[in-house]
Amino acid sequence: MLQLRTAVQALSKVFRGKFMAALIRAHHQGDITNEPPGDSNAWCERLRQLYKYDWVVYAKTPLGGPAQVLEYLSRYTHTAQPSAMNAFGPSPRKR
């Protein structure tokens, strides 16, 4: 259990770093809407607040093996097809 906790803590830092890098990139490219233009003090304060706390990434113990992964995923892939068919309506009948 200690190994999983350590891995989750490391994953939290990696996720925060990647998220923050994407956020900064979007800021520099002007992709963030509803942001006051030219207010660098507010932007720096926002970044400081985001880095201030440890982020928590929820991670479960991995499944037992490939068979269990396939069984888990099959529950969702099996139910996705009828939903997609309903969204587009019935196909026309050929005579």
Image (cartoon, rainbow, N blue to C red):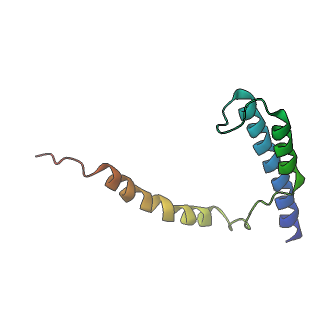
**Residue 92 place in picture, x, y as percent:** 19, 46
| Quadrant showing the N terminus | bottom right
Q: Is residue 67 above or below residue 94?
A: below
How far across and down, in percent of the image, does residue 3 sit?
87, 65
Outermost residue toward the left in this view = 95
Q: Residue at position x 55%, y 66% from top?
A: 71
Quarter-wise, where is residue 10 in the image?
A: bottom right
Q: Residue at x 50, y 65 (%)?
A: 75
> Residue at 72% of width from left, 65% of height from top?
62
* Residue drawn at (83%, 33%) of the image: 40
Camera-nearest residue between 66 and 77: 77
Whether residue 78 sits left or right of residue 12 in the image: it is left
Q: How many marks?
A: 0
- Residue 82 percent across, percent down from the top left: 36, 58
Q: Residue furthest bottom?
A: 1
Q: Is residue 40 above or below residue 80?
A: above
Tell me: 10 left or right of 59.
right
Picture coordinates of residue 50 (x, y %)?
Answer: 83, 50
Image-based side of 75 in relation to 59, left or right: left
Q: Nearer the viewer, residue 12 or 50?
A: 50
